[in-house]
Image (cartoon, rainbow, N blue to C red):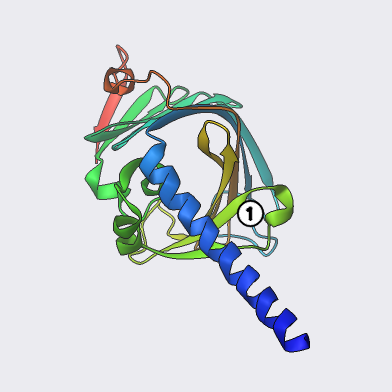
Amino acid sequence: MKLFLMALLAFAFSAAHADSLATLDQFIQSTKNGRAEFVQTVTAPSSGSGVDMKAGKVKLSRGTFEFLRPNRFKFIYTKPFEQSIVADGQTLWLHDVDLNQVTSRKLSSVMAGSPAALFASAPNLQALQAEFMLQALSDKASDGLEWVQATPKAKGKQDNGSLLQSVKVGFKQTPVGVEIAALEMVDSFGQTSVIKFDKVQINTNLTSAHFNFKVPAGVDVIKQ
């Protein structure tokens, strides 16, 4: 009986791990677009980070998020500073309102191995596994989410130039489909960025035109 219970528990544990990868695949296949509000918390490691944040310091930002497969998304930061990150399918645009500056990059040069590939780029789980080592997690099941850890095979760079070490993505099963609920990212400096999504809507009436970016008049444009 003891051996039977141990085998049963082992099966349940492995099944739980398989389920979160299946949920990721379901999200890729069935969730074509979405929008949400978000809160982002960036925390520097207690030992210091080598980036422009004091050890242990926490930065809080708020904004809205939208995405449309393939390769289109918007992060619009509204607090504490106004900033927009827009991918239109070809180009990644970063608009810093305070600096009155727009930076543009070829999208293909920054998507591979980036968190955006998890929700807006890869056409299927196999394509995602070509970019990431994927591992189903069960240590955060108490929050009601299904978690997958993705470690880039080719270390991609974030917008601040720091190397992305790993990212965890949390999904929520709902009556209308699979929602992305959270992202947890760690860079090579040990800096942690957590994005939690709220008021999520999926498979709405978003179109590709919604992600077109128009450079505001009088703004400096830097191409990278």
Query: Looking at the image, is 150 positioned above or below residue 68?
Result: below
Which residue occupies 23% across, 46% down?
Answer: 108
Quadrant (top left, top right, bottom left, bottom right) of the C terminus: top left
Q: Which residue is more in the foreground, 183 or 179?
A: 179
Provide the residue designation for mark 1.
Answer: 44
- Which of the two residues, 116 or 201, is positioned nearer the viewer here? 201
Among the 4 quarters of the image, the one containing residue 102: top left
**Quick one: quadrant of the N terminus?**
bottom right
Work out whether residue 147 can be spotted. Answer: yes
Q: Residue at x 28, y 37 (%)?
A: 70
Taking the spot 41% from the left edge, 51% from the top edge, the residue there is 25
Residue 77 in the image, given as x and y percentages of width and height: 52, 27
Q: Where is residue 96 in the image (x, y as percent from the top left)?
A: 43, 27
Judged from the image, the secondary structure of the residue bearing numbered disc 1 is loop
Q: In this view, does 165 lie above or below 98?
A: below
Q: Does residue 76 appear in the picture of this structure?
A: no
Rendered position, 17 above or below 78? below
Residue toward you, 77 or 121: 121
| Three-letter code for the amino acid on which mark 1 is drawn | Ala
- Residue 76 vs residue 114: left or right? right
Residue beneath the point at 37% across and 54% down: 157
From the viewer's perspective, tell me whether residue 31 is left or right of residue 197: left
Residue 31 figure quarter: top left
Residue lying furthest right in this view?
Answer: 2
Q: Mark 1 Cα within 10 Å, few/some/many (few <14, many 20+)? A: many
Which residue is more in the foreground, 107 or 175? 175
Q: Where is residue 107 in the image (x, y as percent from the top left)?
A: 26, 41
Extreme residue in the front direction: 1
